Structures are given as C-alpha cells and as structure tokens.
C-alpha cells in the first residue's frame, strides 16, 4: 500500500462546532491543496445542512496521536488513584445528596 | 507452534473478544489483516457506488420537468458525491490511499453496485431510483450504522440522516406521476417494472451462495444477512407500491401469513452475474464517464498543487 502519492492533494482532518456552546468534533477528512481550499471543501462536504457554525481543518500529518498499544502503561498513572472518584468516599445517607 | 503464531492467535482472540463485547475498532487498533482487507474492499466499493451513482441521475439534470425538481435532483446528486467522500475518507483510515482506490475503480479491479449499470430512460426512472434504489440502500446502511469499525459506522450514520430525503423525494415523484395522466401513470409503472428486480439484486447473492457473509457477521461488519435485508425491503415496499396503485412485476409475490412476510419469485441470477462481470447495459459507459471526469480534472488538481507550492515558497522567502 505504498503507491506513490506525491501527486495526491494533502489530507486534512476536519473538526466542526455544530453550535455555540459545544466543542469542535472530528467529523472526517478530505483532500485539498492548501488550508484555504480545505476550509471551503469542508464547508461543502460536511455542512450541507447547516451542521456547523465553525470549522477547523488541520493537516493529518500535523496530528500527533497516542498509540493504542501502550493504552495500558500510558494511562496507568490514573488507574491506581481511586480516591480521585467521588464513589471512593463512604458518607452516611443522613448527609443527603453530595 | 512458534512464538509468533502464538502471539497472533492471542491478538486475534483479543480482537474477537472486543468485537463480541460490542466495542468499536478504531483505525490504530490492532486488527486481523483479513478484517482490514474485507473492510477496504467493502468500503471502497461502497464509496465507488456513491460516486458512480451520480451518473444515471446526472442524465436527467438538464431535463428535469421543473426548476423545483431540478434543484432537488442537483442537491441529491451533490449528496451522493458527499457520501462518496465520507466513505473514501473512512476507508483511507485503513491505510489505502485515495489514488489507489481510484486506480482500482478505473482498472475494474474494484466493483461498484450493479444497479448503476442500468439506464435511466424516462423521468419516472429518477423517481423509481429515489424510492427503490435509495430505499434499498437505506435498508443496507441502517444495518451498517452498527458496524464494528468505528469510522465506517460513523460515516453510515451521517449518510443515513441525509438519505431519507432521497427516498422521500423519489416517492413523491412516483406519487405525482401515478396520480397524473394515463401516460404518466404508465411511465411510472414502466419504471417500476424495470427497476424492481435490479433493486432486489442490490442485496447481493442468497445467503447460501455468499462466501464472505459468515465471516463478516462474526466480525460484526455485517449485522444482518443479504436475504434478511432483502426480505425487510420487500415487506416495507409492497404496501408503498399498493398506495401508488402500481403493480410490482412479480407474479409470485404473495403475503405469507405464517411467516408474516411476503413470498416472492426467484431473482435472475444470470443477469446479476453478467452485470457484475461487466456486461450490463451501461458498464462501459459508466466507467468511461468516470475515468474521463478524473483525467479531465487532472490539470485542475495539478494547478491547485502548483499554486499552493508557489504560495508556500513565497511565504518561506518572506520569513
């Protein structure tokens, strides 16, 4: 799967805020020659029915991602700290909701 | 058993356990190579179908009977292009490039749905395609919304949301024609006659003849079998045809009280095989139109890249 892709337009990942108050969310990717074209393409491909009020595009090669293989060790530091969760604390029912 | 196969067996078992537990598989997760290859084949062919699917409808863009119908058809075709893009993008997460997928389509290595190799002879065909072809596609795609591969499932959810308009606009065209003049009603009936059987073929071979089905079900790529989905579509569509006052071209079609489903006649599998292997009415024409469009657009892609390179160079110089 290593066909020469030099002539292919670069890949961009697209993130869309569907309305103010919500986070941008990853929706997919697209090919574009530059960031400006990526934005207009993202508008055409991912917001044909007013699905967004704000779009981010970022070159896929610029994204640094953790790898699933070290899921265990990478997140380990948080696994043994049960006291960070509210359920760690036993309170009597009389106290009511807390 | 050496350590390597041992390792592979363990990974496969873990993978299957994850799938069985209804966890989604994401792009960077370990997956069996055959799972990856099955998805690449299925998803890219799905993407190709969306893109080639624009061609039969494009035939009627300039001849739609009103500005309203033209605007609707344009929006629908634009959606199909968009669906192709969602699916190509999801397939690329499996490690195949867009160019490679285009190559496979253009050289005939990858297939697309047989349905798009039939011609659109009258305006009623545009209605029949929306109602039947998009209806069948929705039946298939709803099942795929729960596919074990995350990016595919997410693309399907987005597509299903948009597809509903496609089917409704098609049914509305059929309704208008079925309630129109005698000639219009005949056109609607003729379109139903020609599209019914090819639509049933969209669900693929019978389960007993579908080699990859069992494995795909085990991997939860597929959730329902070809025959189950076909039956579901028929049961939903027959009453819709009755409402239109049109007759489905199958003398063996009959409600089966015991099964709670419609019995129906045998599909012409020879025709299906002929269309799959490239000898449908429009196979060559469709592929040529697709290749011409791709080659014809090359100078635009080249120019856009050259422009981006020039701008980047200028920016570097100024810095």
Image (cartoon, rainbow, N blue to C red):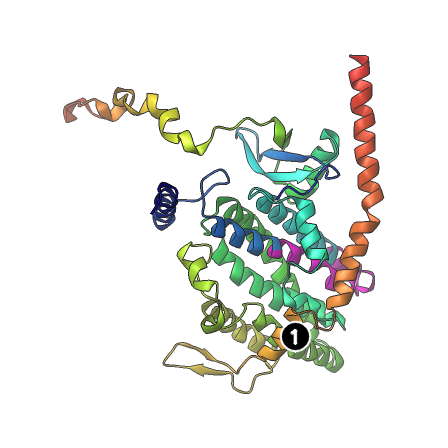
Q: Which residues are magenta?
A: B45-71
Q: Which quarter of the figure has residue B116?
A: bottom right
Report the label total: 1
- As drawn, B100 above or below B198: above
| Residue sitting at the far front | B2
Closer to the camera in the image, A94 or A40: A40
Name the chain letter of the residue that bears numbered label 1: B
The vertical placement of B49 against A59, above or below, is: below
Residue with the mark numbered 1: B274
Q: Position of residue B71 (x, y in %)?
A: 75, 55
Q: Position of residue B204 (x, y in %)?
A: 54, 68
Residue B175, can we see it? no
Residue B315 falls within the magenta-colored stretch? no
Up/down of A7 relative to B235, above or below: above
Main secondary structure found in the magenta portion? helix
Which sits in the foreground, B84 or B175?
Answer: B84
Q: Quadrant of the C terminus of chain B?
A: top right
Task: Determine the residue located farthest toward the top in the rendered image.
Answer: B319
Residue B191 screen position, x and y as percent? 69, 76
Residue at the spot x=56%, y=47% of the render?
A: B155
Asked if residue A5 can be seen in this view, the reply is yes
> Does B234 appear above or below B213?
below
Image coordinates of residue B196 in percent, x first then y, are 61, 75
Question: Which residue: 67% across, 45% down?
Answer: B98
Q: Is residue B126 left or right of residue B240?
A: right
Q: Residue at x 54, y 67 (%)?
A: B203
């Amino acid at each position: 799967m290593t066909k020469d892709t030099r002539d292919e337009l670069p890949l961009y990942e697209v993130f869309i805020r569907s309305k103010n108050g919500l986070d941008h969310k990853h929706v997919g990717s697209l090919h574009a020659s530059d960031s400006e074209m990526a934005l207009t393409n993202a508008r055409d491909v991912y917001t044909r029915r007013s699905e967004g009020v704000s779009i981010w595009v970022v070159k896929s090669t610029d994204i640094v991602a953790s790898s699933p293989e070290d899921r265990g060790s990478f997140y380990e530091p948080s696994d043994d700290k049960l006291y960070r969760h509210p359920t760690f604390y036993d309170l009597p029912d009389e106290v009511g909701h807390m | 058993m050496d350590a390597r196969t041992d390792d592979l067996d363990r990974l496969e078992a873990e993978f299957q356990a994850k799938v069985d537990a209804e966890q989604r598989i994401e792009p960077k997760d370990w997956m069996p190579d055959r799972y990856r290859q099955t998805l690449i084949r299925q998803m890219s062919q799905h993407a190709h179908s969306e893109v080639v699917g624009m061609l039969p409808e494009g035939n009627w863009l300039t001849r739609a009977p009103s500005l309203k119908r033209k605007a609707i058809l344009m929006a629908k075709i634009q959606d199909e292009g968009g669906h192709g893009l969602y699916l190509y993008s999801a397939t690329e997460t499996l490690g195949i490039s867009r160019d490679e997928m285009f190559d496979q389509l253009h050289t005939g290595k990858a297939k697309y749905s047989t349905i798009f190799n039939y011609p659109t002879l009258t305006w009623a065909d545009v209605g029949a395609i929306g109602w039947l072809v998009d209806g069948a596609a929705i039946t298939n795609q709803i099942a795929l919304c729960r596919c074990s591969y995350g990016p595919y499932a997410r693309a399907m959810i987005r597509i299903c949301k948009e597809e509903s308009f496609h089917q409704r606009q098609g049914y509305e065209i059929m309704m208008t024609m079925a309630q129109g003049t005698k000639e219009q009603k005949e056109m609607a009936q003729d379109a139903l006659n020609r599209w019914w059987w090819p639509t049933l073929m969209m669900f693929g071979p019978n389960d007993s003849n579908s080699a990859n089905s069992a494995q795909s079900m085990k991997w939860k790529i597929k959730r329902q079998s070809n025959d189950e989905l076909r039956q579901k579509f028929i049961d939903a569509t027959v009453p819709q045809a009755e409402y239109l006052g049109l007759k489905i071209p199958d003398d063996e079609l009959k409600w089966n009280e015991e099964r709670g489903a419609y019995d129906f006649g045998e599909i012409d599998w020879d025709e299906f095989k002929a269309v799959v292997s490239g000898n449908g009415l429009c196979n060559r024409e469709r592929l040529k139109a697709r290749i011409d469009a791709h080659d014809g657009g090359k100078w635009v892609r080249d120019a856009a890249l050259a422009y981006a390179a020039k701008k980047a160079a200028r920016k570097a110089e100024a810095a």
